[in-house]
Amino acid sequence: MSAWFPRGSSDGNVLYIVISLLWFASSHVIMCIVLIHAALSLMPSFFTLSYHHLMQHVPTWEGRDKRYYRDEFQGSNFSNIQFDGTDSSIPGSTSCMKGTVWDLVPGVKEDMYSHQREGFEFMWRNIAGDTKLEKLKQTLADDARGCIISHAPGTGKTRLTIVFLQSFLKLYPACSPLIIVPKGMLLTWEAEFKKWNFNVAFHNLNKKELSGKEHTVAIEVLEEIESGVLSQDCIRLLKLYSWERGGSVLGVSYKLFEKLAGQRNGKSLQHKKIREVLLQRPTLLVLDEGHTPRNNNSLIWKALTKVSTQRRIILSGTPFQNSFMELFNTLCVVNPKFADQDNSVRGPRWKNLDNSSGINRGTMLGMRAVLEPYIHVHKGTVLEEKLPGLRHTLVFLHPTKSQQLLLEKACKEEMFKMIRMVSLVSVHPSIRAVVKEYFTRREEIATDIDAGVKAWFLLKLVRFADALGERVLIFSQFLDSLIFIKEQLESIYSWNEGREVVYIDGQVDEKKRQESIYRFNDETSEAKVLLASERACSEGINLTGASRVVLLDTMWNPSVEKQAICRAYRLGQKRVVYVYRLFTSGIEVGQYKQQHLKERISQGLFSLGEEHSEYAGAVAEDKVLDAMRSLENFDQIFEKIISQPKESDLIKTFGMEGQK
């Protein structure tokens, strides 16, 4: 710090005193504000660090030109930082360049898949208006619109987005992109930035510590403070200030963004400043798994609609989740002008589609015409071309007598409780939640593993897969089932959590979760099985260490299961991926029927002329399942097995009819 503000100088002494006082009081907001006013009253009236003054003392940051710091630095008071303003428009390139946007990232085009190249140009046309540099405006205008990159899970949307950000920051170096993601994916984004050598600071607003990539002036000031801990608000303001300078990327989870930018955020000066910056300062908004804020009554949806920039990108392999109205809400997030255009007519019209008994081909074609300008679709043909294969199997199991008795009881419950109890009973009748509901003592029911057909199937599958050197990924929406399976693996096979068994749910710390993912994917580790909560692990992460995926229960939303499968079936997978859907009751079959109908609607909306077979390139045999069926006294648990189910199989088995 002495190189910038010598301790003996008036500027240096005053700045040092202010920061020291702020640090001392950072955990006490009221005291902090009092000290701020006291310290400011001591400053001479002329104490203002102008751009020219600052540039005499501050070295360039990571080789950046001094013009990026033209605004006056008045940020020594971290709880009352003076940001650049509320205008999200940004200056453009200072030189009139020729060529295309590909020239901004030389050598990258050849390394990308064709669908990524198309998506890259689609982003530029929607966000900036063109792909030719001479046609791009020197200053980004307000007439931009958002877009949705609907590429199948596992086909490289993160890489595509990083390349786009790289080129965008090259042409508009003062911009401030904001990426909002599910909490568990923030570390993945950080890792991807490093993997692809994206030499731009990534400020993780969820982290409680500084990264060392914050603004140079602030870092040097903090280095003068020898010990102690800054308050979380001060750390967040410092990150926001560093990002707001331009030329870096800010990452935050949906939940934290809702907390900081929503109406329920605190009324203190710091909270108001944070909210103002998050809503007004982004010049580009990227929403990973952007179907997340699809309920227009949710706080996160309301907060996102208040972000000022029109330049928005949604990344989602499954934009259609449950209904047309949810899709309409998603379109309103990515393109606010879409909602403004006769919303009183459009909204009810989309809602009426959900109430229709069937959607005809004409309606689908009309919907496609509405969606096409905003959505770039890739259904995953690159996976069929590049990966060894995918095999889906529907496995219908006979419940045991004790399970059948409990299933009959469970089916008399109200809907949500019924779904939960049916799922738990189908795994094993001795799961604690089942015992608590229907028995007084656990000893009243059989605790042998073969008393529950799904649990019995799983333990055999894991053992046979391990013999072939393969790893198994088990998904469930209910933690009781996952915990029970974990206990059985530890008891029967003497495996240990953290070594052979990896367990991840929504309560696992983010850092530990990332370590568990690395361990499971590491071919040299002893990991054999990963037990994963469907909601915590079904989106945005790479689990290519698994080649067998088991869906322990059935969800109403087909996109959740599709996302779960694509944790293993994605670019980078070296083996054939086998997927097993397990059924033991008519309730689960009914859920699957609803899934299939929703999936048919999604395919009708987003195929957009691209022919795609869900099971193309799949393999013809499953040695593990064949070996399990040949076991004596084990084949009796199988009621029916449908491999690579076709439309005719589903109609015959479930009575399903496709859309006309």
Image: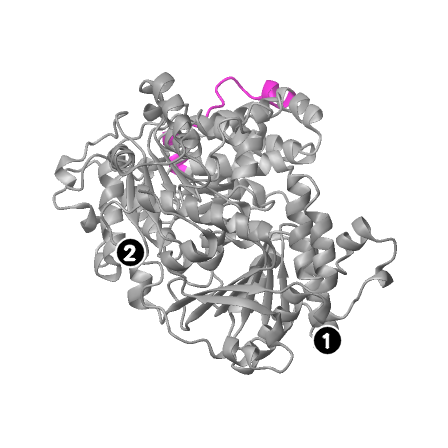
Q: Position of residue 414 (x, y in %)?
A: 68, 39
Q: Residues within 10 Å of mark 2 (few under 14, many from 20)?
A: some
Chain part drawn in magenta: 38-56
Question: Under tag 1, what secondary structure?
Answer: helix
Residue nearest the viewer, comparing 503 with 405: 405
Q: Is residue 229 visible?
A: no
* Label 1 Cα crowd, 10 Å radius (few <14 / some 14-19 / many 20+): few
In the image, is residue 136 above or below residue 537? Answer: above
Q: Residue at x 60, y 18 (%)?
A: 41
Frontmost residue, 72 versus 459: 459
The x, y position of residue 175, in whole percent, is: 34, 36
Using the rendered image of the protein, determine whether residue 645 is visible from the camera's viewpoint. Answer: yes
The disc labelled 1 sits on which kind of residue? Ile
- Type of the residue with mark 2: His
Residue 371: quarter of image: top left
Asked if labels 2 and 1 touch by Cβ distance under 8 angstroms, the answer is no
Against 439, residue 396 (above or below) is below
Q: Is residue 196 magenta?
A: no
Identity of the residue drawn at 70% across and 77% down: 493
Name the disc covering residue 492, or none.
1
Q: Is residue 595 left or right of residue 285?
A: right
Locate residue 261 relative to residue 17 in the image: left or right. left
43 is within the stretch colored magenta: yes
Report x, y in % for residue 474. Answer: 57, 63
Q: Which mark is residue 612?
A: 2
Quarter of the image that includes the C terminus:
top left
Scheme of image coloration: one colour
Which comes sooner in the sequence, label 1 or label 2?
1
